[in-house]
Image (spheres, rainbow, N blue to C red):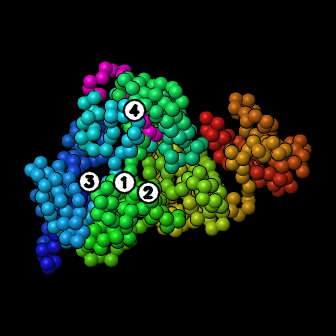
Amino acid sequence: MNQAQKTVVIVGGVAGGMSAATRLRRHDESMRIIVLEKSGYVSFANCGLPYYLGGVIEERDSLLLQTPESLAQRFELDVRVNSEVLSIDRAAQAIDVKTAAGTETLNYDELILSPGATPFVPPLSGVEQALTLRTVEDVDAIMARTHELPSGASVAVVGGGFVGLEVAENLSHRGFHVSLVEAAPQVMAPLDTEMAALVHRALRDGGVDLYLGEALAEIRQSKIKLASGSEVPADMVILAIGVRPDSRLAAGAGLALSERGGILVDEHMRTSDPHIYAVGDAVEKRDDLTGQGVLVALANTANLQGRLVADVIAGRPVAQRPVRGTSILGLFGMTAASVGWNERRLKQEGRDYRATHTHPSDHAGYYPGASGMSLKLLVDSATDEILGAQGVGESGIDKRIDVIATAMAGGLKASDLAELELAYSPQFGSAKDPVNMLGYINRNIRDGLVETVQFHELQDELDAGALLVDVRTPGEFTHSPIPGAVNIELDALRERLGELEIDRPIIVHCQVGLRGYLAARILKQHGYQVRNLDGGWKTWNSAQQ
């Protein structure tokens, strides 16, 4: 069969599959391209589904990006919805497809698998009553159920990941009494404890009841039972426990899978069969820090892989990039985002790292409307490589995490962040942008100008005999002291040096870290053994919550 007659069959639409199909057409007008989608919708905004539930997206049709007819008109694609691929005959390069009319066999020259992922549904009593959210059909089912419930009815959302949080927020906006159940001690696994605490506060302030460290045990009529024995009212239950790669078709064809069930592909998205490719959430990716396999379900990556596999089939010299898991969430007026590894994972892997917390404003404080943010940077202690970053705040978090993700992609070191030339005007940022400040702070630690203590190390240091000095104003100290601290205001520190024992280790702290740094510089130059509490009282206080 010559190039002009080549047939490419794509199993699964949405991000990965449709990106591959449309880019293939842009490369080759003569190619026969068939897209098979199991559901009734081949191109829709699945990330927008929770916002349709909440009424933020008012029109259902806004979720539908393309139809088989529009794709045929513009790209001359043969798109078939409600078409389930049952099996792959690798030797014959053929697939069996089930449709409403029966089963047919299609031959292919190249096959692209883009089946996505499926929601995890635990085998529990009553689980058949629960709903999940992944497709347009799912959102239709949930929306229909909400219309049956009275105002103020109880909804239990099980799972504190991105989908669970977005569903909880949007149904809360609709006037439902929402309970969020999460088996882990915190929501948003990419965040560390002290950063997730800020998300917990936003949820509670938004009226959501949180059940953390609580596993679902049973779904009953109008309530759920947790493993602890507690019962939570629930007129509707939505499961958002997570997703699993939909690799059943690949497994049935004997393609290589990872231990976690992801389809194994090479740098050109080829599976263990040279004529079969795979993209999207069903595929195991390569972690940027270790090069090891990792499962990351992100639309950006699926779209990129779809484009890449089209380039490969078209003969272009490309290869997939590793992933850093850059992600973001909006919740009750707050933004939380992260990139790379968190501190918890670094500890598990035994990596030598340093952590830096800072709490700047999103733009110049003198310009109206400035709001605070919490940023965290994780850095390799030996190489100064950026390992990860996290941010939580009302505004400007997306910009800062995106800058750091770009710096990581470009191989910049953490101290290089201080040198970045970033756009500045008072309503958008500060002359020293929060990203620059992370670079300055990291550089000070790297160069030995200051040593720091983390919030989770503080009590052990105090128990070992260190003195905690609060350099905030007396008013700040009286309002919110850390137990065991003594108050010596920064501006009076030089005058009161005689009150401090020269041989006793000292830890200084302020509200967010800056005054503590200034105090540490003063004390160090006067011969004291001193460290600054990283992120100050604000980071410590978040962790206590």
Camera-side mark, 4 or 1: 4
Q: Secondary structure at mark 4?
A: loop
Tell me whether the residue at label 1 lies in contact with that at label 2, contact meaning CB atoms closer than 8 angstroms. Answer: yes
Residue 156 located within the stretch drawn in magenta: yes
The magenta segment: 146-160
x then y, percent, for residue 126: 37, 31
**Residue that badge 3 annotates:** 14
The circle on residue 260 is 2
Task: Single out the mark in the foreground, 2 or 4.
Answer: 4
Q: Observer-nearest residue: 291 or 412? A: 291
State whether residue 346 appears in this view. Answer: yes
Question: Residue 125 shows which numbered tag?
Answer: 4
Residue toward you, 117 or 415: 117
* Viewer-side label of 4, 3: 4
The Cα atoms of the two marked residues, 2 and 3, are separated by 23 Å
Residue 254 in percent (x, y) is at 32, 65
Residue type (three-letter) at the residue carrying disc 2: Arg
Q: Which residue, given by chain and number where applicable, does mark 1 sit on?
A: 245
Q: Distance between the Cα atoms at labels 4 and 1? A: 24 Å
Of the image marks 4 and 1, the number of the one nearer the N terminus? 4
Q: Is the residue marked by circle 2 packed among few (<14), some (14-19), or many (20+) residues within 10 Å?
A: few
Q: Residue at x 17, y 49 (%)?
A: 82
Q: CA distance from mark 1 to mark 2?
A: 8 Å
Identify which amino acid the numbered label 3 is placed on: Val
The disc, 1 or 2, on the residue closer to the chain's N-terminal end is 1
Q: Residue at x 33, y 57 (%)?
A: 247
Instruction: First in sequence, mark 3 or 1: give its number.
Output: 3
Using the numbered discs, state the Cα–Cα distance from disc 4 to disc 3 in whole angstroms.
33 Å
355 left or right of 118 in image: right
Q: Residues within 10 Å of mark 4 (few under 14, many from 20)?
A: few
Q: Residues within 10 Å of mark 1 (few under 14, many from 20)?
A: many
